[in-house]
Image (cartoon, grey):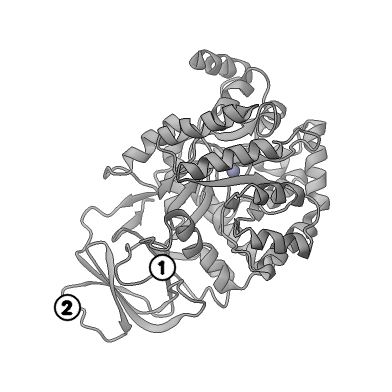
């Protein structure tokens, strides 16, 4: 049945664009048993300052020592670090490996392998998948153990637990014609109407290896029905009973509070419609949750609305020109968008300043801010590039650079794997997931995109031209 829907969709849409995605990277075939990053600035992510002129030693895939430079490098592969900064591998808190960032006027079916490679090529050595095809994610997750896997280590939720006919179904129905909408919806939404269905939805995901449960409490388009408090509560409670964290897609302060009051552990977007008061921020802080603003989602939506989308230099390397062309102003300008979608985009644009202010309000209230890109889950959120752009936007919102770096490393790592996470910091005993940057990101946030070396589990990820 599903393949019939797919076939019909293909027929109706015309053939979705086919792209030849670049290989981008390969893992070095024989990692050196010992590597030393010599005379490097180290931002360990355990605090907010950097150590200068250090030697960082990696043995058999693990960090074993951090010491002032001048250590014995006999027999080691040396990577010169003078003038550069070593940080933990990035952790993207919000990706969709089974999604595509293509615009609806140039539908491209998802390429999971390219999504994964683009993330890793951008220094993202770990990631949390925030919604997608459970069966496919389960298979991908198993393939992580194989040498052929070229992507971040990841954790997944499966389809988003959502109100029947609410978001994301309500949005998919606007973006795609029938029956393509049915195929797209099956990939991302897991509709429920009752508490019994909420419990069954959680159980089915957990039975299939899910690591967390994602739910949606949002109005897209603006008048769409949202999941009522009792269904939110039933979903979150069941997730917790099963030992999983619950993460929620929210849009307004009202929906953020609904999530918080039900015990949600993470908000997967910031408050991007309307205002966030200091009082509400204090309640979110008291609820002990974390927030991933995904400012890049709204930044790119605004740019497409105004025909001024321009991929970053990194994105031009990660994606073929055929994929990027539909985003150009010339092609973008020719599209007619659904009035309901335009209304939502207009409101997003109108609330631009409030959205940035909400991030700072949350930060000032002491709510942990985590970096997530919505890679391949939102139009224009190109895998890898969107994450690096998110770091720039968090800085623009007023988050100090050191906390942007922590948002991109240790904080998501601890959310995913607890205080004992073996990644997300540079400390003896941790996995050698490392990124070497050209410059000092504490002085200049754009340095976070200047990747010199990416190492995952002690192996250098080499560029393929
Ligand atoms: Zn998402």
Residue 74 showing in the rendered view = yes
**Image check: 121 left or right of 169?**
left
Question: How busy is the neighbourhood of tag 2: few (under 14 within 10 Å), some, or many (20 plus)?
Answer: few
Residue sitting at x 76%, y 49%: 254
Secondary element type, mark 2: loop
Q: Quadrant of ligand 1?
A: top right
Dot 1 or dot 2: first in sequence order is 2
Identify the image quadrant of residue 101: top right
In the figure, 59 relative to 464: above or below?
Answer: below
Q: Which residue is mark 1?
A: 425
Mark 1 and mark 2 in contact? Answer it, CB < 8 Å.
no
Viewer-closest of 301 and 328: 301
Residue sitting at x 41%, y 39%: 113
Residue 337 on image: x %, y %: 77, 33
Q: Mark 1 CB in 8 Å range of ligand 1? A: no
Residue sitting at x 72%, y 49%: 303
Q: CA distance from mark 1 to mark 2?
A: 26 Å
**Image check: 314 left or right of 426?**
right
Secondary element type, mark 1: loop
Of circles 1 and 2, the one toward us is 1
Residue furthest to the left in view is 75
Residue 422 on image: x %, y %: 35, 61
**Image check: 77 left or right of 291?**
left
Question: How busy is the neighbourhood of tag 1: few (under 14 within 10 Å), some, or many (20 plus)?
Answer: many
Q: Which residue is mark 2?
A: 74
Residue 160 on image: x %, y %: 57, 36
Identify the image quadrant of residue 285: bottom right
**Image check: 308 left or right of 130?**
right
């Amino acid at each position: 049945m599903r393949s019939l829907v797919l076939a019909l969709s293909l027929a109706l849409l015309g053939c979705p664009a086919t792209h030849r995605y670049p290989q981008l990277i390969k893992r070095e075939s024989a990692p050196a048993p010992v590597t030393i990053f010599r005379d490097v600035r180290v931002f360990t992510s355990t605090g907010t300052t950097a150590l200068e002129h250090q030697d960082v030693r990696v043995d058999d895939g693990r960090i074993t020592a951090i010491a002032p430079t001048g250590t014995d490098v006999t027999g080691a592969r040396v990577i010169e670090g003078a003038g550069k900064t070593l940080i933990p591998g990035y952790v993207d808190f919000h990706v969709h490996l089974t999604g595509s960032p293509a615009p609806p006027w140039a539908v491209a079916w998802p390429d999971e392998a390219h999504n994964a490679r683009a993330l890793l090529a951008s220094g993202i050595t770990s990631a949390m998948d925030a919604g997608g095809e459970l069966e496919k994610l389960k298979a991908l997750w198993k393939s992580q153990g194989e040498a052929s896997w070229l992507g971040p280590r990841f954790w997944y939720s499966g389809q988003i637990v959502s109100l029947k006919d609410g978001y994301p179904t309500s949005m998919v129905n606007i973006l795609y014609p029938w029956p393509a909408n049915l195929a797209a919806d099956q990939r991302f939404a897991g509709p429920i109407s009752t508490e019994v269905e909420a419990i069954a939805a959680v159980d089915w995901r957990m039975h299939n290896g899910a690591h967390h449960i994602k739910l949606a409490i949002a109005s897209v388009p603006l008048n769409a029905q949202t999941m009522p408090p009792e269904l939110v509560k039933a979903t979150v409670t069941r997730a917790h009973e099963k030992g999983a964290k619950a993460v929620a897609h929210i849009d307004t302060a009202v929906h953020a509070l609904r999530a918080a009051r039900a015990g949600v552990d993470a908000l997967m977007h910031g408050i991007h419609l309307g205002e966030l008061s200091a009082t509400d921020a204090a309640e979110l802080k008291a609820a002990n949750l974390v927030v991933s603003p995904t400012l890049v989602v709204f930044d790119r939506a605004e740019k497409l609305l105004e025909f001024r989308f321009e991929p970053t230099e990194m994105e031009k390397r990660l994606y073929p020109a055929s994929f990027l062309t539909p985003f150009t102003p010339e092609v973008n300008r020719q599209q007619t968008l659904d009035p309901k979608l335009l209304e939502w985009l207009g409101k997003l644009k109108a609330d631009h300043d409030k959205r940035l202010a909400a991030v700072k309000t949350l930060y000032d209230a002491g709510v942990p801010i985590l970096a997530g890109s919505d890679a391949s889950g939102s139009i224009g959120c190109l895998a890898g590039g969107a994450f690096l752009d998110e770091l720039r936007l968090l800085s623009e919102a007023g988050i100090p650079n050191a906390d942007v770096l922590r948002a991109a490393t240790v904080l998501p790592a601890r959310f995913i794997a607890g205080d004992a996470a073996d990644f997300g910091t540079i400390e003896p005993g941790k996995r050698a997931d490392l990124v070497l940057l050209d410059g000092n990101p504490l002085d200049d946030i754009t340095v976070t995109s200047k990747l010199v070396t990416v190492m995952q589990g002690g192996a250098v990820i080499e560029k393929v031209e």
